[in-house]
Amino acid sequence: MPSLKPNKGAKKRFKVTARGKVLRPAAGTGHLRAKKSSKRKRLQRGKRLVHSTEVKKIRRLLVT
């Protein structure tokens, strides 16, 4: 049986922690940063947890 390959796009966007939680980057950081406040940009630096209803779907994409 052929080996399963992870989805390359998902691999670049999501990270699974040691306890199995899935992290994602904050939304709204792609462009147009000049008009956003410093506080807003600072708060968008960190990672966010993926909602529990989406975790199963993303783990399936990240299967190795």
Image (cartoon, rainbow, N blue to C red):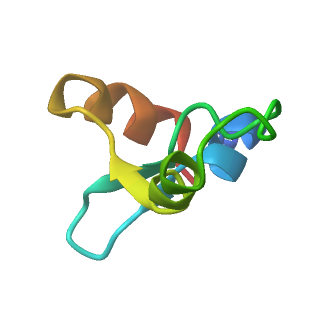
Position of 55 relative to 22 (above/below): above
Question: Residue 31: percent from the left, percent from the top?
Answer: 82, 33
Residue 4 in sight here: no
Query: For the point 20% across and 71% down, which residue is it?
Result: 19
Asked where in the image residue 30 lies, by quadrant, the reply is top right
Q: Nearer the viewer, residue 23 or 1?
A: 23
Query: For the point 61% across and 31% down, which residue is it?
Result: 28
Position of 64 relative to 17 (above/below): above
Question: Residue 15: percent from the left, percent from the top?
Answer: 49, 59
Question: Residue 38: percent from the left, percent from the top?
Answer: 59, 55
Left or right side of 20 for 42: right
Q: Quadrant of the N terminus?
A: top right
Left or right side of 5 for 57: left
Q: Nearer the viewer, residue 42 or 55?
A: 42
Left or right side of 62 for 30: right
Q: Quadrant of the C terminus?
A: bottom right
Number of labels in the image equals: 0
